[in-house]
Image (cartoon, rainbow, N blue to C red):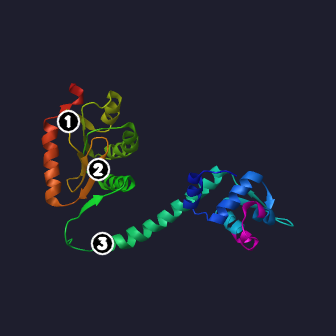
Amino acid sequence: MSVSHETKKALRELGLTGYETQAYLSLLEKGKMTASQVSEAADVPYSKIYETLNSLDKKGWIKIENGRPSRYYPKAPSEALEAAKLRFESRIRSWEQSLLGELQALYEKRAVREKPDIWIIRGEFNVLAKLREMLGIVKNELMIAVPSLPKELVDLVYPMLAGLRSAGVNILFMVSKGVEEKTLEKIGEVAEVRIRNHMFGGGIIADGKEVVLLLGEEDKPNLVIWADHTGLVKFAKDYFEYLWRTAKNVNNL
């Protein structure tokens, strides 16, 4: 069965071993089979086939029809994926209890932090994770300045901003001239929006306590810095407020 490298990689990342992937794909292609038939079709050693099939059953990817001999058949990929999602969500909840319940408490016991943090963040997923973390803890005010505003970014942040707005967070959103009117209208539903002719880089300031600076090209920043350094955050907030005062309100355009 010809399956793309990306699909096989996804199955591995979902927790399937090489033998399990081969067995499941063979069952998808040929349908119900005995263990020996799966072993031959999937090129899995017979000494490993029962271990492989039992593991696939526990992970929710196949079903077993008892008999002499037992037969194995695949679950629908949509059903198996849903089961995998539930397992991952359960594991994440367990990790959260340990990390936030125990390690976070140890972290917060320090009366004074040795020094403020300044990090360079690399990689799109790491940047998005840090932004989600910031948006998850902001309580009072969120300042956002972005030179460009692609639809993909709007679709990503809109639900989070809507949740913050409903919780009473004051959101100030500043963009460069040229953003589509429909995009401005959508963001305007959850934030006060202003426009400047030009912006070099951007940033996000949460409650005046931490900042993410986006430096570089308008379409894709090449340097992302996170900091909770009091002086750096104050400088970023003061600079944002200066730009905000001289920006145009979208309602007056």
Q: Secondary structure at mark 2?
A: strand
Q: Quadrant of residue 44?
A: bottom right
Residue 238: where, in percent of width, then height? Answer: 13, 48
First along the sequence among labels 1 and 2? 1
Q: Which residue is mark 1?
A: 198
Residue 14: where, in percent of width, then height? Answer: 56, 60
Q: Residue at x 40, y 44 (%)?
A: 156
Q: Residue at x 58, y 63 (%)?
A: 15
For the image, the number of numbered tags is 3
First along the sequence among labels 1 and 3? 3
Mark 2 → mark 3, Cα distance in angstroms: 31 Å
Residue 137: where, in percent of width, then height? Answer: 31, 56
Label 1 CA crowd tier, 10 Å (few <14, some 14–19, many 20+): few
Asked if 189 appears above or below 13 in the picture, the reply is above
Mark 1 → mark 3, Cα distance in angstroms: 41 Å
Closest to the camera, between mark 1 and mark 2, is: 2
Q: Which mark is residue 222?
A: 2
Q: Quadrant of residue 226?
A: bottom left
Task: Give the residues in magenta.
Answer: 40-51
Q: Which mark is residue 20?
A: none
